[in-house]
Amino acid sequence: MTTLEVRGLTKTFHKIHAVDDVSFTLTAGRTVALVGESGSGKSTIARMIAQLVRPTSGEIALTGPDGEPVPRRRYRDNVQMIFQDPFASLNPFHTVEHHLARPLKLHGRPRTEVPHLLERVSLTADFAHRRPHELSGGQRQRVAIARALAPGAKVIIADEPVSMLDVSIRLGVLKLLARLQREENLAVLYITHDLATARHFSDEVLVMYRGRIVERGPSDDVLVRPQDPYTRRLAAAAPNPESRFSLGGQP
C-alpha cells in the first residue's frame, strides 16, 4: 500500500522555526488530522508535502504499493493538495472541463475521464461546461477535489478544505472526502482547527503548537482525554452545542 513518511521535517523563515522536527506517517485507507491554532505550522507542512515549499531539513519519503520508493518524477502523480479557498484555487477564465482535463493530460491520462471524475464528486456531466463563477462554493470545492484525483493520486493533503464554505454545506464536502478515502483507499492528511470534525473524520490526531507536535494518538483518546496542557486548552475552547448558557437567570 502507498505510504508517505515525514521524518524530522523543519522549516525556518528568517531564524523562526515555523515547523520544528515534525515526524508522522500517512498510510492508505487512513485519515490523519493535523490540528492547532492559526500560525502553528499546519499549512507550512502541507505546502512542503505538496512540494510548494522546500524544507530547511528533514525528509519526505513516498513508498508505492510494491514497497519501493516512488521516483521523484512520479511524486505528483501520487500526492495532491486540496486548497482552503475554492474561490481562489480555480481560474475564473476556464471551464470546469479545462480544470480537470489539464491535470489528466499532464499526467498521461485520457481527457475522456472528465465525466467520471465529476461523477466521483457527485456532480453531473453538464458541470463540465460551466465556469467557476457559475458554481456555489461547495460545488467549486468538489471540482477542486476532482482535480486532485485526476492524476490518480493516492495521498491527499486537505488544507482546511471546508473553512471557507457555508456551514450548511461543510458536512456534505467532508462526507464526500470520507467516502472517497474508503472507496479509493486514499491516505489523507486533514488539516483543521475544528476539533469536532477532526474527531469524527480522522483515525489519528496530531496536535501542533508553535511548530511542534505536542500530542498524538487515536482521535478519541486525544480529543476526549487530552494529556498535553495545550490540547486541553484547545478542547476547552471548542464550542459545545449541548451546553447551556444563561444571562441574568434566563436561558
Image: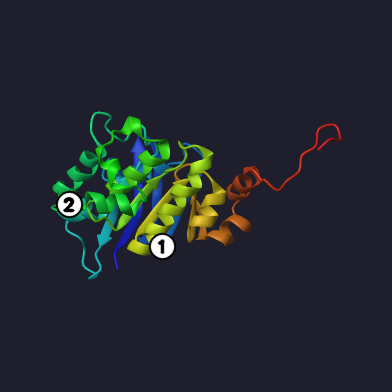
User: Can you identify the residue that label 1 sits on?
Assistant: 30
Label number found at residue 182: none
- Whether residue 21 appears in this view of the structure is yes
> In this rendering, does residue 149 appear at all?
no
Callout 1 crowding tier (Cα within 10 Å): few <14, some 14–19, many ≥20: some
Instruction: Tell me how far mark 2 sits from mark 1, CA to CA.
Output: 30 Å
**Residue at coordinates 76% horizontally, 43% vertically from top-left?**
244
Tag 2, which secondary structure? helix
Location of residue 188 in the rendering, given as x and y in whole percent from the top left corner: 38, 56
Q: Quadrant of the C terminus?
A: top right
Q: Residue furthest bottom?
A: 66
Residue that sits furthest to the right in the current view: 249
- 165 or 7: nearer the eye? 165
Disc 1 residue type (three-letter)? Arg
Residue 204, percent across and down?
Answer: 48, 60
Sequence-first tag of 2 and 1: 1
Q: Which residue is mark 2?
A: 112
Q: Is residue 51 rendered to the left or right of residue 18?
A: left
Q: Quick check: 199 above or below 1? A: above
Which amino acid is tagged 2? Thr
Q: Characterize the local packing of mark 2: few (<14), some (14-19) or many (20 or more) Cα atoms within 10 angstroms.
A: few
- Give the image quarter of residue 54: top left
| Front-lying residue, 137 or 21 | 137
Q: Is residue 2 left or right of residue 209?
A: left
